[in-house]
Structures are given as C-alpha cells and as structure tokens.
Image (spheres, grey):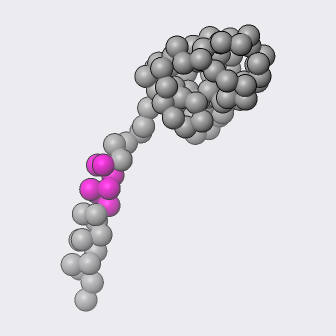
C-alpha cells in the first residue's frame, strides 16, 4: 500500500513516500519514514499526528493513498492572537479622528 508521511518547519518540509503492508498504522508509517534523519530537531508528539488534516490515534490503520501528517506545536495560542488583534483594532478606532 502506498502512503505519504509529511512533517516540517516553516523553513523546511519533508515528504516521504512509502510502500507499506496492508493494515499498517500511523505509527508504523512515521517510524518507517525515519523523519529524524531528515529533520533532527523534530520532536514527534503522538497527540499531534493526523491523516489529511484530521487528528488520529497512532494505532489508526492506514488506507491506500493516505497522507500521514506530523504537526508541530503552535507558536501562539489562536484565541490570544484574536484577542490581541481585537484590542488593537478597538484602540485604532478610538484614535481615528
């Protein structure tokens, strides 16, 4: 079965195509991709892996053509960013003459 494993940082991404046996899991695909050889600073958090943009458990069985994605931690909390942007927008509106 053919699958892809992707991971990366803002400055570097890796896509590895693999042929795995049927019934292979997300964990088996990530381990077979040997991502640390390509991205030594990558830390795999098994709570942050998915298939086509949807989080999934590491024991999820893969299907033909699946793309396993290893997500990196967010650099900022999206809720906090929205609050800060709203605050800046309110301040901007209050200073407009």
Q: In the drawing, does residue 37 fall left or right of residue 53? A: right
Q: Is residue 40 visible?
A: no
Query: Residue extending furthest left?
Result: 94
Whole-percent x, y for residue 33 in the image: 68, 16
Locate residue 17, reporting x and y percent.
76, 24
Vertical comparison of 73 with 41: above or below: below
Magenta region:
79-85
Q: Residue 11 falls in which quadrant of the image?
A: top right
Q: Residue at x 66, y 12 (%)?
A: 23
**Residue occupying the far bottom of the picture:** 97
Q: Quadrant of residue 41?
A: top right
Q: Residue at left 68%, top 20%?
A: 38
- The front one of 30 and 86 is 30
Please check the rendered image and state whether residue 35 is part of the magenta-colored stretch, yes or no: no
Magenta highlight on residue 84: yes
Give how far across and how far down residue 49 sits, in percent.
Answer: 51, 25
Dominant secondary structure, magenta: helix
């Amino acid at each position: 079965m053919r699958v892809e494993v992707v991971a990366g940082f803002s400055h570097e991404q890796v896509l590895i195509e693999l042929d795995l046996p049927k019934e292979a899991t997300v964990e088996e695909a990530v381990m077979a991709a040997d991502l640390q050889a390509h991205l030594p600073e990558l830390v795999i958090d098994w709570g942050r892996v998915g298939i086509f943009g949807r989080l999934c458990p590491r024991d999820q069985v893969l299907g033909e053509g699946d793309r396993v994605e290893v997500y990196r931690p967010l650099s900022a909390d999206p809720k906090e960013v929205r609050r800060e942007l709203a605050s800046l927008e309110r301040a901007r509106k209050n200073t407009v003459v």
